[in-house]
């Protein structure tokens, strides 16, 4: 009798059966590329759908913190607690907020008049405020009862102090006003006084990497660099218009960005101050404040045109713009230390919370959901330069006054270019040189 060969199906149940009824159905797939033609067109359609859904889900506004009786003048982030924020107002009141529940946990009157600036100590146990009453007051971060709302220390200044910043490591802080002054917590007199010129200073910031380096913005349109180990200022660069605020890049030691009155932001490298590394433009009015994200790749700017714009540090135009009907002129902006939220203060007495990425889902993501989002991001990056996808990703609705101002500024720029071109055509060759845009806004550099 001959042997008969019988073919049988041999399958492992683990390959096609679910472990539980809550698990997803397993589908066998053959990944042979020849069986899946038209890969690029299918990916393009997925990228188009992904970028459309991103705009559908773009709802950045989270909530507002109301309670101030006057416009918000300044804000300060706690160095170690994500949910703690301090804010000061034009009426001298300071409020401490719990961002997790969006409630005010403390409020007290700290100064007579405008609270100019607030800054937390590096350990987070105290914070210091300065105001129009020429005082520098240090407060506890946490108190047991409202009766304890007395300053730990009060320093008297000879002139109005308009800014304060703490050293990253040492127990010293710098203030600005008539001059830039270095203080120690244990002394009633400044340790050092830096003088250069006669105009007042309105903003000062310590570098968080090169700890001894600090910079200030002056009313004579200059940006001044100091080293707290030296006896005098280091260098000064004069702009065409005044700079309102300054922020150091937390990841690159030599890079800082200034918010300017000419509607632009300028990123400088301290090793080459004769021209900015980059010019960031899109605002239609003076830029009031700027703050970097913890990654150093992006920063947020608040402007007098009632909008908040998010810029990538290496690009010249904003990637997103936030606005509401009720939000008026911005006075201060902060980027949270977990890189997820943006906080803005404006002169209609409200602090607003926004998502750093407008379409991001808050809360816990399931593994499949996270994978799908990463895949969508990769597709948007791959096809980002295709006209349709680029148009949808860039499109933003803005208020009418912003749209009209953008058209007017565009007309002015085109007119200036046309005028320079005509002058160059009808002049002697070489008499009207080409001046790069980055060199137009810097007047001079002093050492």
Image (spheres, rainbow, N blue to C red):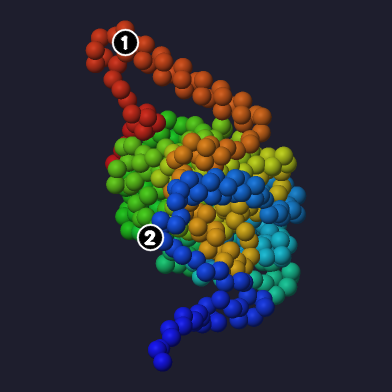
Question: In this picture, is 143 found above or below 54?
Answer: below
**Residue drawn 64% across the image and 80% down it:** 20
Can you see residue 252?
Answer: yes
Number of residues whose C-alpha sits closer than 10 Å to that of mark 1, classed few (under 14), some (14–19) or many (20 or more)? few
Do the residues under discs 1 and 2 have CB atoms within 8 angstroms?
A: no
Q: Which of pointers 1 and 2 lies earlier in the amino acid sequence?
A: 2
Using the image as rendered, state which of residue 33 and residue 301 is in the foreground. 33
User: What x and y, as percent, mark residue 427?
Assistant: 29, 9
Q: Nearer the viewer, residue 245 or 325?
A: 325
Q: Nearer the viewer, residue 430 or 28?
A: 28
Name the residue rendered at 61%, 25% in the picture. 404
Relative placement, left or right, of 11 versus 214 is: right
Circle 2 is placed at which residue position?
Answer: 209
Q: Position of residue 403 (x, y in %)?
A: 61, 29
SS at badge 1: helix
Q: Quadrant of residue 307?
A: top right
Mark 1 highlights which residue?
Answer: 425
């Amino acid at each position: 009798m001959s042997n008969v060969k019988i073919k049988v199906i041999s399958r492992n149940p683990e390959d096609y059966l679910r472990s539980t009824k809550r698990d997803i159905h397993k589908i066998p797939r053959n990944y042979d590329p020849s069986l899946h033609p038209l890969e690029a067109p299918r990916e393009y359609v997925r990228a188009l759908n992904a970028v459309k859904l991103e705009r559908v889900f773009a709802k950045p506004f989270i909530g507002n913190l109301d309670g101030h009786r006057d416009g918000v003048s300044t804000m300060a982030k706690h160095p170690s607690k994500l949910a703690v924020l301090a804010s000061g107002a034009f009426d001298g009141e300071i409020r401490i907020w719990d961002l997790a529940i969006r409630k005010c946990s403390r409020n007290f009157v700290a100064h007579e008049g405008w609270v100019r600036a607030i800054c937390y100590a590096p350990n987070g146990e105290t914070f210091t405020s300065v105001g129009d009453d020429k005082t520098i007051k240090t407060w506890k971060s946490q108190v047991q009862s409202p009766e304890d709302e007395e300053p730990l220390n009060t320093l008297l200044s000879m002139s109005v102090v308009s800014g304060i910043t703490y050293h990253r490591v040492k127990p010293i802080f710098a203030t600005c006003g008539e001059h830039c002054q270095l203080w120690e917590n244990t002394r009633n007199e400044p340790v050092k006084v830096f003088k250069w010129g006669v105009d007042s200073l309105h903003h000062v910031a310590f570098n968080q990497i090169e700890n001894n380096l600090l910079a200030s913005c002056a009313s004579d349109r200059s940006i001044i660099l100091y080293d707290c180990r030296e006896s005098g200022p280091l260098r000064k660069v004069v702009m065409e218009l005044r700079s309102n605020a300054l922020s150091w890049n937390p990841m690159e030691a030599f890079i800082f960005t200034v918010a300017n009155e000419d509607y632009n932001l300028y990123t400088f490298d301290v090793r080459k101050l004769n021209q900015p590394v980059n010019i960031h433009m899109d605002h239609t009015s003076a830029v009031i404040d700027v703050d970097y994200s913890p990654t150093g790749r992006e920063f947020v700017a608040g402007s007098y045109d009632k909008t908040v714009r998010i810029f990538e540090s290496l690009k010249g135009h904003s990637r997103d713009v936030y606005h509401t009907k009720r939000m008026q002129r911005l006075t201060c902006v902060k980027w949270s230390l977990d890189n997820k939220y943006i906080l803005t203060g404006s002169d209609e007495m409200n602090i607003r919370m926004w998502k750093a990425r407008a379409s991001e889902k808050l809360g816990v993501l399931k593994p499949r959901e996270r994978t799908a989002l990463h895949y969508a991001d990769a597709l948007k990056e791959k096809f980002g330069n295709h006209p349709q996808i680029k148009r949808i990703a860039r499109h933003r609705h803005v208020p009418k006054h912003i749209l009209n101002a953008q058209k007017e500024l565009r007309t002015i720029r085109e007119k200036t270019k046309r005028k320079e071109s005509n002058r160059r055509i009808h002049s002697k060759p070489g008499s009207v040189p080409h001046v790069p845009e980055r060199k137009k806004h810097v007047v001079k550099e002093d050492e």
